[in-house]
Image (cartoon, rainbow, N blue to C red):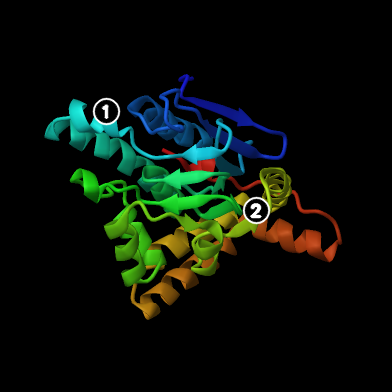
Amino acid sequence: MKKTLATELNERGGYSLILNCPVEGGNLFCSDMMDGIYDALLEAEGLRDADIVIVKSGQDDVFSRGHNIERLQGGLDHVEAKHYNYRGQRIIELMRSMKKPVLVQIDGDCFGPAFEMALAADLVFATERSRFAFPPETEYGFMPGFGGTQLAHRKIYETFVKYLVFTGGDKVASQELFDKGIVTKVFTDNKQMIEKVKQFSEMISRRSSFAIGLAKETINNSIDMDFNKGLLLEQNAFTFSFSTNDKHEGIKAFIEKREAEFTDRWEDYRF
């Protein structure tokens, strides 16, 4: 376990990734932390006891203020920059492709690559004081590179995405992103959010993990599809779900008025 990242698995099936890069400036992204995030996501994907992945900060009052600009300014040539970019993009790709839901829990500033992670997440919980932005990357001569331009315009309308990227330093409140459909829930403070995340984890752990993964796969893969092709993908996934043990157990439990005991797990089908 790297010092820049901690992980924990609670009894409710929540697997937490706790970001904690010691570089001064607000939990800045560094290569060690990004490698740790990727490795932890892979580990979570293979854990039968993990039903939901929760990404949060180990530092008070901030999720992450983004890149370590001094490191990027003087320490990376174009080859190293490509490897740095790859480290970030593979996190985004894994968050999107893994069957388990990924929830990002934000209290404080969420800038740059951290904002890109939030855009890649399935659910975003944030406090009222949280702020989101692509820091002034264009002011430094580069642009978002961890999927931000691609994820944002698939979730928000084009002109607002350009505004976020072009201005960079203009911070957006969590409530505004809630209104635009990016933030899932907004909470008064961190204490309230932690309690709600706990309740949400408990609820997810009572659902069919296999059905949730199938639904996530269907939603993510049909975003850019023709509507009729998307309907066909949904139809195939729906039909496939009727062959699972979880479907039979879920309906049986409903009829018998008891809690279902789901057994189908995506972990059993990983290569």
- Residue 244 image offset from top left, x and y in percent: 60, 56
* Left or right, 258 with reference to 189: right
Q: 180 and 205: which one is in front? A: 180
| Residue drawn at (63%, 31%) of the image | 9
Q: 21 and 238: which one is in front? A: 21
Q: Give the number of the disc on residue 71.
A: 1
| Residue drawn at (60%, 36%) of the image | 15
- Residue 249 image offset from top left, x and y in percent: 72, 56
- Residue 184 image offset from top left, x and y in percent: 57, 60
* Left or right, 132 with reference to 134: right
Helix, strand or loop for disc 2: loop
| Residue drawn at (41%, 34%) of the image | 38
Residue type at numbered disc 1: Arg
Q: Determine the image quadrant of residue 30.
A: top left
| Residue drawn at (54%, 32%) of the image | 18
- Residue 131 image offset from top left, x and y in percent: 49, 51
Which residue is identified by label 2? 208
